[in-house]
Image (tube, helix red, strand yellow):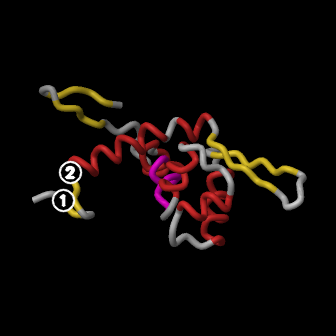
Amino acid sequence: MRSSKGGVGVVQSTDVRPEACPVLKTADVISGKWTLLILRDLSRGINRFSSLERSLVGISPKTLSERLKSLERVGIITRKSFAEVPPRVEYTLTEMGWDLIPLIERMREYGNKWLTNGRPRE
């Protein structure tokens, strides 16, 4: 919940138990290395494993597979298999996944405004 204190937004706790905190639950979903970049690519329409792998330079196939399975398990993406030769699999964001995109965009804005080369601006 957000309230205003002298014109400045104040984030208030919604629960005293950390495991029930919606902020921590959201952070847990998106915190894995590569996860935000996978979501970014899916929001741009890149939806096949090989295309994601090419876009995410440096990710291993095993890691990409694990991240996709994790996102599917929590309902952020869906996986659709096509009975073709060779087999084709496409990944798409669910409504739950699309709701994360404005958050990711806001994180980009914050980084552009306040961080340079991974460090706070001086």
Q: Residue at x 81, y 51 (%)?
A: 81
The amino acid sitting under disc 1 is Pro
**Label annotation for residue 114:** 2
Residue 25 locus on image (x, y percent)? 49, 48
Task: Label the magenta part by its dominant secondary structure.
Answer: helix
Q: Residues within 10 Å of mark 1 (few under 14, many from 20)?
A: few
User: Element type at marker 1?
Assistant: strand
Q: Residue at x 53, y 49 (%)?
A: 39
Q: What kind of residue is marked 2? A: Trp
Q: Residue at x 15, y 26 (%)?
A: 7
How many dots with numbers?
2
Position of residue 60 relative to residue 9, above or below, is below
Q: Which residues are magenta?
A: 26-32
**Above-or-below relation of 74 to 100:** below
Q: Residues within 10 Å of mark 2 (few under 14, many from 20)?
A: few
Q: Between 117 and 4, which is closer to the camera in this rendering?
A: 117
Q: Does the stretch in magenta take in 105?
A: no
Residue at mark 1 to residue at mark 2: CA–CA distance: 6 Å
Q: Which residue is mark 1?
A: 120
Cβ atoms under marks 1 and 2 closer than 8 Å: yes
Q: Tell me where residue 41 appears, x and y as whole percent.
A: 54, 50
The x, y position of residue 109, in whole percent, is 30, 43
Picture quarter containing residue 94? top right
| SS for dot 2 | helix
Q: Which mark is residue 8?
A: none
